[in-house]
Image: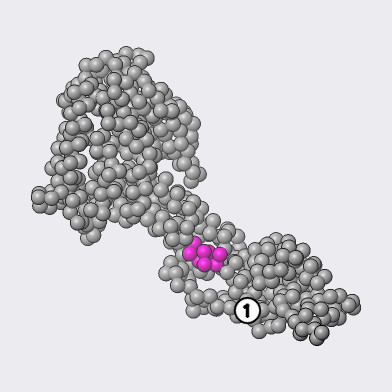
Amino acid sequence: TIMSNTHRARLERRIAGSTNRWRFPKQPFTGDLLSLSQMFKALSIDFEEALRNPDRLHISQIQKFFCENFKNKDIQSAEADVILECLGFKWELHQPQLFQSETLAKLYLKALTQGTTYPLRELEELLRAQSPKKTKEKSPAKRMIISLKINDPLVTKVAFATALKNLYVSEVEINLEDVLGVLASAHILQFSGLVQRCVDVMITRLMPSTIKNFYEAGCKYKEEQLTTACEKWLEMNLVPLVGMQIHLRKIPQDLLHKVLKSPRLFTFSEFRLLKTMLLWVFLQLNYKIQAIPTHETVMTFFKSFPENCCFLDRDIGQSLRPLFLCLRLHGITKGKDLEVLRYINFFPESWLNRVTANHYHALENGGDMDQLKDLNTQAVRFGLLFNQENTTYSKMIAVYGFFFKITGLKHDTTSYSFYMQRIKHTDLESPFVVYEHKPVSLRAARMVKYEIRAQALVDSKWQEFRTNQIMQKFGLTKPSCKSHILKIQTVGIPIYVSFAFIFPPS
């Protein structure tokens, strides 16, 4: 029987060096088996697996070889191994640094093996030439030209140059104005170390002016650590910080929706959160306004729409309904605030009727909030923002004729405690407080289900302290008038303290 050419080629023996070792004459395995085995062993690549799957190039192992052997080694020659054509420039690069980028490594190896019958021999010679043990005998490697096309508008020449510089020098300073472009460049280069550095920089520089772009970059490049950091930062700062600046306009609706649904959201009161949301809508519809308007201006704007249809029922408001369904309108209990809800003609009549009916039922039944069950999603919320200058800070709140003082105390530079205490209406410091809220409950005891939560930012990570969900009967005298005390230790400032409670059925 005549042996097929394929079978004959597979069994062909060739001389390799001073030995007569087996080797394959055809690509991709052009080196002798012993040298290939030694090379793959150095790269921690499974030799038999590589023989079975020759088309799978183990870039990560080759990267590891270069990074471990040459990361901190000085470039002894100014002669570049590679010319990278990108963004209209020619960038000179060297092999050890180039292999930190998976994208550039693939481009280089592809260029290295193009037009040759023996691609693995080229790779073997490359590794031998770069071996630290043979620096005196190093043979010159091929000078390659590779091209990279970039269509990402975030990538600027300065940002891309900064990314390439990071191949050579660790801890290159990344400027705030360039960090988005550097992150985009790092993703294109598949330079994981630089990606993480950019994410770390962005997390430490979150502020009203950067939150929008950083969040969108996190979504675009699927950097979950960054998007999560943006969400947590906005949960704390939407009402007290961003809601006071024109940057509120830039907050994306999907981010806003996530934050509004979060049980960690900080607000001074439910009405204050509503005002922030109304301002956000106003700024979306009034692009030319470049300064924060007064509350009266915002109210007048919504009142200006025809009264035959509320804002959320209009075409312009339909897409905003999911945002406002997240609000806890039942937590708005002051008479004058409820008057604002009706005045602006923003909410459907059915929503307002439900709020009014719930309030009426609660007042008739000693404050019982029968419709509220879940503390995380339905509780009435009040907040204290404890700043550096505060040693004692308290605020009076009133719900259905029951008065409480929410208080924060600073004991030393890192020790704080927070609690709430029921106050008898005759003990209030000012009779105006009673007049402002009008209803007064004379019940000696009020069952309350509550939770106290404190959060602070330390080294770009949020510390969270909380009580359990506590059911307690609040009387008018000590000790029953005072809640559980939340004691914390933190160096973070400010401290965002939330008091969430419901009055369960008696």
Relative to 55, 408 lies left or right = left
Which residue range is magenta in the image? 183-190
Relative to 293, 104 lies left or right = right
Residue 189 colored in magenta in the image: yes
Relative to 16, 503 lies left or right = left
| Magenta span main SS | helix
- How many neighbours does mark 1 have within 10 angstroms: few (below 14), some (14-19), or many (20 or more)? some
Asked if 58 appears above or below 489 in the picture, the reply is below
Residue at 48 percent of width and 53 percent of height? 224
The image position of residue 493, as x and y in percent, is 43, 38
Residue placed most toward the observer, 429 or 116: 116
The image position of residue 201, as x and y in percent, is 49, 54
Q: Label 1: which residue?
A: 111
Residue 468 colored in magenta in the image: no
Residue at 44 percent of width and 38 percent of height? 456
Q: Is residue 418 visible?
A: no
Residue at 54 percent of width and 56 percent of height? 196
Residue placed most toward the observer, 188 or 497: 188
Q: Quadrant of residue 394?
A: top left
Quadrant location, the C terminus:
top left
Amino acid type of disc 1? Ala
